[in-house]
Amino acid sequence: MKHYKTIAAALWGIALCFPNTIWAQDIDEDVDDATPAAESHFDVPESSVIDEVIWVVGDEAIYKSDVEAVRLQSEMEGVKWNGDPDCAIPEQLAVQKLFLHQAALDSIEISESDVISGVDEQINRWIQIAGSQEKLEEYRKQTVAEMRLSLHDEFKNNELVREMKQKLVKNVSVTPADVRRYFKDVPEDSIPFVPTEVEVQIITQQPRIAPEEINRIKDELRNYTERVNKQETTFATLARLYSEDTGTARQGGEFGYVGRGELDPAFAAVAFNLTDPKKISKIVESEFGFHIIQLIDRRGDRIKVRHILRKPQISRENMEESMARIDSIGEDLRNGLFTFEEAAFQLSDDKDTRNNRGIMSSVDSETGSLSSKIRMRDLPSEVARTVDTMKVGDISHAFTMINSRGKVVCAIVKLTNRIEAHKATIAEDYQVLREVVLNKRREEVIHNWVVDKIKHTYVQMDNRYKNCNFEYQGWIK
């Protein structure tokens, strides 16, 4: 895509002379056929257009192909546009040009490692949406390598825009008086609705795995290593066939570039010591199961590896034994033999909650802070189903669930608080209302900045867009 845009830019002078359209000509066609006179008398068939400059913002051109690329991505991700996409998408691209220009003036930079990691995450999300790498490549008519190349600048630009916006609003703040004043005369249907929230404590225990099962898994992994070393097959092929890491199996077990802190410590200790891409690591046990790892590339303090994950299976007898054990703990708690907090600290296998008295928490999407108040929809599905019929103070019977590391565990929970769905109030939901007002102020600052920037920027657009109902005023001059 980058080399194509270079060609298109070289034809910009022609576009200025022959209102915006670049034509496809047969190589041996007479050049005289493409004169301005011919263009002015005849409509150019859509099929003969290679690409088209539709907007110019400052000294930056926006092409028809840019709009089509955004539209394709939006359709794939289910993004809905406010208003006509034919107008909204070019305007969004034009606004992006304004932010990128300012980001360059302010010397805002994005590291290459962050760009590579972000692109890989995006492609992995697309693969999950499409169902497989092959289906994704068929849908986008690009290989994954081509997608990485074409997404590089797009991702970097999006991050620059995000950083620029954060810089513009970093000093925006609101006071409690601002919040009260804003909501004093707001219509009832404009007050935020807070869904049901609960506070939950949890104890989990992992069923014991028989030594014979662990040996079986290790033998499988040794067999994979032997087959690759004998060149009977490739590591990537075996990962697609046998790896139980659903997030990477479709990509042949491949991670994007990751730092040490992003990996399980045991996994990272082995992965970061690999130096030869032709060699396969020893078997590694992590919190997720057992792995073998192959190095692909290293860039500074980040590595790209592929792996095969295998998870030992739990026998019915061991599962029943674990369920009986944790049910017994629940019965002792209901009889008051010890507190839930004591049991969580002494008996729970859940590293995320054990040292926090068993209290589950989630990251608040607005503030980024941890909160013990969790919306029902944000709970693990097994916990939500159990809590839904409980009363405050109840301790559940044992149930099984998949923990954050993909392992089957046995669990009991205690419902410590429930806040039913309600309209937000200053007294109970100040933070919710504060975020509404704060976001409104930030939006106003951004909007006003864009409008002012448009006033001082050269803008030219194709006539077809001059009847659009734009979000920002001032484009048409």
Image (tube, grey):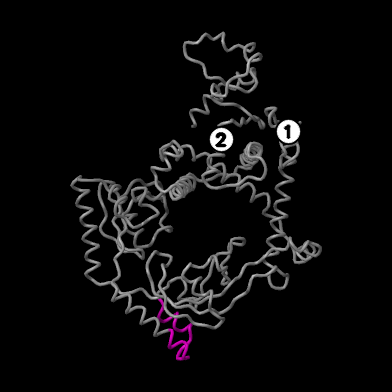
Residue 215 lies, in percent from the top left, at 22, 66
Helix, strand or loop: magenta stretch: helix
Q: Circle 2: is it few (<14), some (14-19), or many (20+) Cα within 10 Å? A: some
Residue at numbered disc 1: 467
User: From the viewer's perspective, is residue 322 above or below residue 114?
Assistant: below
Give me the residue at 30% from left, 49% from top: 275
Residue numbers of the magenta segment: 330-348
Mark 1 to mark 2: distance in Å? 20 Å
Q: Secondary structure at mark 2?
A: helix
User: From the viewer's perspective, is residue 233 above or below residue 260?
Assistant: above
Q: Secondary structure at mark 1?
A: loop
Q: Amino acid at mark 2?
A: Glu
Q: Amino acid at mark 1?
A: Asn
- What mark, if any, has residue 68 been given in the picture? 2
**Which of the 4 quarters of the picture holds residue 35?**
top right
Question: Which one is in front, 147 or 453?
Answer: 147
Residue 418 lies, in percent from the top left, at 59, 76
- Tell me: 415 left or right of 458: left
